[in-house]
Image (tube, rainbow, N blue to C red):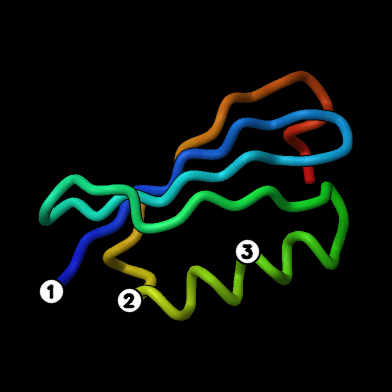
Amino acid sequence: MSMYFIGIDISKYKHDCCIISAADQKVVSKVIIKNNKAGFNELLTIIHSLANPADIRIGFESTAHYALN
């Protein structure tokens, strides 16, 4: 079982994402997605390629209304 942590820095037009493997604490991926449906679909594709969703933890800052999406 592999556990992954995804940190997301929220902003108005884009989100900076970093994915870290819990096993060896190394960065697996850094990606910038747009703050729109296409960007979220891109992130979902990456997430689904990693592991079982139960083995993934996501954290992000709540930056006013930009985090609502």
Residue 7 lies left or right of residue 2; in this view the side is: right
46 versus 34 height, above or below: below
Give the amino acid type for the residue marked by disc 1 in the picture: Met
Q: Secondary structure at mark 3?
A: helix
Circles 1 and 2: CB atoms closer than 8 Å: yes
Q: Secondary structure at mark 1?
A: loop
Residue 59 lies left or right of residue 40; in this view the side is: left
Closer-to-camera residue (23/44): 23
Q: Residue at x 77, y 29 (%)?
A: 11
User: In this figure, which residue is indicated by the disc labeled 3?
Assistant: 43
Query: Mark 2 or 3 closer to N-term?
Result: 3
Q: Residues within 10 Å of mark 2 (few under 14, many from 20)?
A: some
Give the amino acid type for the residue marked by disc 3 in the picture: Leu
1 versus 36 height, above or below: below
Tell me where residue 65 sits by quadrant: top right
Q: CA distance from mark 2 to mark 3?
A: 13 Å
User: In this figure, which residue is indicated by the disc labeled 1?
Assistant: 1
Q: Which mark is residue 68?
A: none
